Amino acid sequence: MATAKRDLTDPRVQGHPSGMTPEQMSLRGRMGAHAVHARYDSRELTSNARKAFLDRFEREVDPDGRLSPEERSRRAAHARKLYFSKLALKSARARSRRKDA
């Protein structure tokens, strides 16, 4: 049985087996996001992931669990600030490179 060849230069078939254009896929994804957020509270949906992300800093500063809860929390707060400061620096450098290019 012969199968029809797909024209890979047609933007509707590049990257997606349904043949949707990138714009259609984007719109479909946006519709899905709106449907989820209309039904659920975003904070509830992401609470487990957010907790795991924040717990990571406590494990980083006290891997053996030897610090008092107060000291662990204090150090974790600084570890978070360090993490986000590094992200900000990387972002600033990337913006600068794009501006110079």
Image: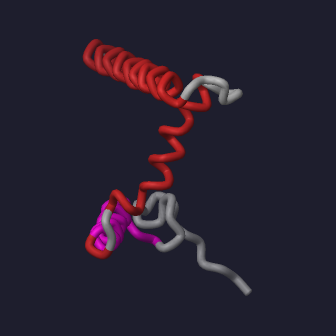
Residue 86 percent across, percent down from the top left: 42, 18
Secondary structure predominantly adopted by residues drawn in magenta? helix
Left or right of residue 44: residue 18: right
Farthest residue, direction bottom: 1
Q: Nearer the viewer, residue 47 or 24?
A: 47
Residue 30 percent across, percent down from the top left: 30, 64
State the image quarter where residue 84 is shown.
top left
Q: Quadrant of the C terminus?
A: top left
Q: Do we see residue 83 in this rendering?
A: no
Range drawn in magenta: 19-37
**Residue 29 magenta-highlighted:** yes
Q: Nearer the viewer, residue 70 or 32?
A: 70
State the image quarter where residue 89 is shown.
top left
Q: Do we see residue 17 in this rendering?
A: yes
> What residue is drawn where x is 42% and y is 56%?
46
> What residue is drawn where x is 50% and y is 64%?
16
